[in-house]
């Protein structure tokens, strides 16, 4: 996903839900048990362009509204 390419709110939320379900949840026990920072999850979020949600577009971010950010974080937290 390119910067600013998230477009609608639902796209970011669905993408986060998919990552959470298909990647993060599968790794959670390993990271929790070993008290390890989930670097792989961070990398997945970067590749999906979800780390720049709160960064304004003029600085290369997505510039998402706060409702989109909140809903996206809820989905990420499920994993």
Image (cartoon, rainbow, N blue to C red):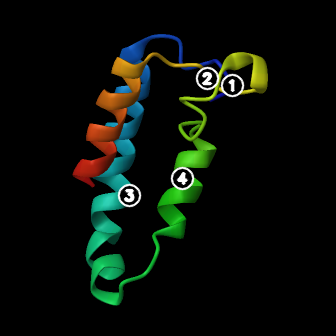
Q: Dot 4 corresponds to which residue?
A: 44
Q: Which residue is mark 2?
A: 62
Dot 3: element: helix
As drawn, 62 above or below 35: above
Tell which circle, 3 or 2, labels the residue nearer the N-terminal end: 3
For marks 4 and 3, the one nearer the N-term is 3
> What residue appears at the point 54 percent right and 68 percent down from the top-left corner?
39
Q: Secondary structure at mark 2?
A: loop
Q: Is residue 43 left or right of residue 25?
A: right
Cβ atoms under marks 4 and 2 closer than 8 Å: no
Residue underneath mark 3: 23
Furthest toward the right, the residue is 59
Q: Position of residue 50 (x, y in %)?
A: 53, 37
Q: How far from the left and from the top, in percent, is residue 61?
A: 67, 27
Alpha carbon distance from label 3 to label 2: 23 Å
Q: Circle 4 sits in a helix, a strand or a loop, which is it?
A: helix
User: Badge 3: how crowded within 10 Å, few (<14), some, or many (20+)?
Assistant: some
Circle 4 or circle 2, nearest the eye:
2
Which corner quadrant holds the C terminus?
Answer: bottom left
- 30, 71: nearer the viewer: 71
**SS state under label 1:** loop
Looking at the image, tell me whether mark 4 or mark 2 is earlier in sequence order.
4
Residue 18: name its quadrant: top left
Q: Residue at x 69, y 25 (%)?
A: 3
Please name the residue that numbered disc 1 is placed on: 3
- Mark whose residue sits in front, 3 or 1: 1
Q: Give the alpha-carbon distance from disc 3 to disc 1, as whole Å.
A: 22 Å
Q: Earlier in the sequence, mark 3 or mark 1?
A: 1
**Badge count:** 4
Does the residue at mark 1 contact the one at mark 2 (Cβ under 8 Å)? yes
Which residue: 55% across, 29% down?
Answer: 54
Q: Position of residue 76 (x, y in %)?
A: 33, 46
């Amino acid at each position: 996903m390119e910067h600013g390419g998230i477009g609608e709110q639902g796209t970011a939320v669905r993408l986060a839900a998919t990552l959470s379900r298909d990647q993060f949840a599968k790794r959670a026990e390993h990271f929790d048990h070993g008290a390890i920072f989930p670097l792989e999850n961070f990398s997945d979020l970067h590749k999906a362009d979800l780390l720049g949600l709160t960064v304004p577009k003029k600085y290369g971010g997505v510039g998402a509204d706060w409702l989109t950010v909140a809903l996206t974080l809820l989905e990420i937290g499920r994993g």
